[in-house]
Amino acid sequence: MKEYTTESIRNIALASHSNAGKTMLVEALANFTGITTRMGKVEDGSTISDHDDEETRRGISLFTSVVPIEYKGLKLNLLDTPGYTDFIGEVISAMRVADGVLILVDSVAGLEVGTEMALQYSEQFNLPRVLLINKMERENANFEKALDSVQTGLETRLLPLQIPWGEKADFKGVIDLLSMKAYQGEGKTGVAIPDEYQAQAEEAHLALVEAAAEGADDLLEKYFENGDLSDKEIMRGLRSTIWEGNFIPVLVAAGASKIGLAPLLEVLTNLMPSPTDVPPAEAIDKNNETVTLEPKDDGPLAAYVWNTTADPFVGKQTFFRVYSGKMVADSRVWNTNKEEEERLAGMQIPRGKEGVPTEVIHSGDIGLVAKLSYTTTGDTLSEKDNPLKLPQADYPNALYQVALFPKTQSDAAKLSSTLSRLCEEDMTLSWHNEPATRQTILQGMGDQHIDVAIRRAENKFQLSLETQEPKVPYEERITRENAAMYRHKKQTGGAGQFGEVHLRVAPLPDEDFEFVNDIFGGSISNNFLPSIEKGIRNLMKEGVVAGYPVHNVKVSVYDGKEHPVDSKPIAFEIAGREAFKLAFKGAGAVLFEPIMKVHVIVPESNMGDVLGDMNSRRARVQGMDTQKGRSTVTANVPLAEMLRYTTTLRSMTGGRGYFTMEFDHYEMVPQHLAQDIIEAKRRADEEKEE
């Protein structure tokens, strides 16, 4: 592949609901432009985009794939993203480095949840968008119906640039409203518009010219004077108005059947911006000041790492986009985030699973480098003497959790390193050890997301894992003061053990733990007090009534006894521990649970179902709001009721609802529920003893 300068590059993310045909469209375009000699199929895993074993097994895209195609002296970097909502992190990463988005809509299904998400995130990133009504050859395909379904859920006006030439089995090609010609099949050459479409095409062409006139004041004046614009003026006006987000142009195609490809490429090359057409990137320099980066090869180097993949055979692969300067093979660059130097050995232009070796990646282009030591997703590569940091993309919080258990001892040894590598690749995946439940927790966007991560751990890193629903990290606290004493006495042959501790416990609302020495008269030597505190702290980690950590308690030791020979630190550790246990149990011990702040966003028609379901989850609704046909419910809900809410909400709303959740505060568990938790712990302890 030849080198392309910044003006000749188009970075275009393809986004949609799952099964709208993104991967097959990329396959068709790659075949049409001569990159491949034959078209692959998703079902047999032979496409240029879906090359991972797990993608082949499931028959859906799981990771963003970069496929550059060359057309009329331009290079289009097509970023084929997954459509399934669990993998939204891949879509966000791709949009972070794209300059425009092609959103596909299934001609039969119309607007779906993945389409809504694509429209929403492309608006957040302020990217110009093109809508493609795809699969027009399908039975029940309906262009107008699909178009209306999208317009209903959208404030931005849709502007058809093409209309279909036939539908369903009769879909022959597209009628282009810019050139006012009809293009059959792949669409390399135009013919006269058939008579039956002439009136419809002229009406749509008029709407298109009016929209183009709105793109610039001089065009609007000329349009009012002459009633028409030249082809160049129409294109200039459309560029302006589309880049400002006033309109979304609409195209038609049947990707898998290779219909409408040339007209589609014409629109993408003419209406999608190059890196020089978009607002320049901003970065933070070493003085913590914001600097503007022009996309020029001779500018200071700034490349954003938007994706990394870890493979034990190929090594780590790092995908980046250059925003300023250029990346040169075998040179050294500075990772500003990690403050480490990296060497660019084996730099490539990514093309599906293959890479084309290259010596230089120009400003505005997307590249790949293997085996970087420190770099992870979200880092900036720059020059050591001029370190720059580009802003990272914002990813949604992970909402679905599982507890992980290694199957063998060797699995346990590599658990943390493997999970860290998986989370470096995927910014919507995270893991932590939960001290309250002593479980390793993996968090993701849904059950499919977690399942893919666990299978990757097994296939790529030979780590075998078992999963369970995670325990809720409850806390044990007390509601009143209480005192207790315990004498530890153990007599064996030789020296024995002796220690007696009298202590008082009290609630401590504003602090986690306080240990006070209230002994008068030296009944216990000061050197034994650290042992008493140690015994209490160890017990607090394990819990007293239900096996959960103890919090917000004050302990004062006020009396005790020691033996001149038999008293040892271990004796007072045990005595302190047991005295605390007795005092705690008699001090109105209660359980506290984490309460989450939840925002649920659903179509207005699902509002009643969601509120009813929330009430069954002990939720306290804080507020409701409806805008643009979507309702938002804000509520405080116990975490125990939200563990599998992702799946419930999807089935309740047909996949169109989503929610965000963050920790808010702790609150007392209702007595009847707390009793069940304590009883379950008692039974578990009895089973262990047996």
Image (cartoon, rainbow, N blue to C red):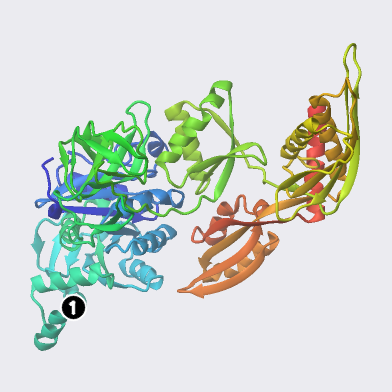
Q: Is residue 443 visible?
A: yes
Q: Name the residue beneath numbered marker 1.
A: 199
Pick whichever, 610 or 173, lies toward us.
Answer: 610
Q: Is residue 136 visible?
A: no
Question: In the rendered image, which quarter contains the C terminus?
Answer: top right
Displayed quadrant of residue 267: bottom left
Displayed quadrant of residue 153: bottom left
Which residue occupies 30% across, 58% down? 290
Displayed quadrant of residue 217: bottom left
Residue 374 in picture, x, y percent from top left:
36, 35
Which residue occupies 23% across, 59% down? 280
Amino acid type of the residue tagged 1 in the rendering: Ala
Q: Is residue 591 above or below residue 100?
A: above
The reply, left or right, for residue 636 in relation to residue 543 is left
Residue 456 in picture, x, y percent from top left:
45, 34
Q: Element type at marker 1?
A: helix
Q: Is residue 462 above or below residue 280?
A: above
Pick whichever, 168 or 173, lies toward us.
Answer: 173
Pick whichever, 468 or 330, lies toward us.
Answer: 330
| Figure label count | 1
The reply, left or right, for residue 370 in relation to residue 560 is left
Q: Which residue is situated farthest in the bottom direction here?
A: 225
Mark 1: give few (<14), some (14-19) or many (20+) Cα within 10 Å. Answer: few
Residue 488 in picture, x, y percent from top left:
89, 28
Q: Which residue is situated farthest in the top direction here?
A: 493
Pick whichever, 98 or 141, lies toward us.
Answer: 98
Question: In the rendered image, which quarter contains the N terminus?
Answer: top left
Residue 505 in picture, x, y percent from top left:
83, 47
Q: Is residue 236 above or below residue 651?
A: below
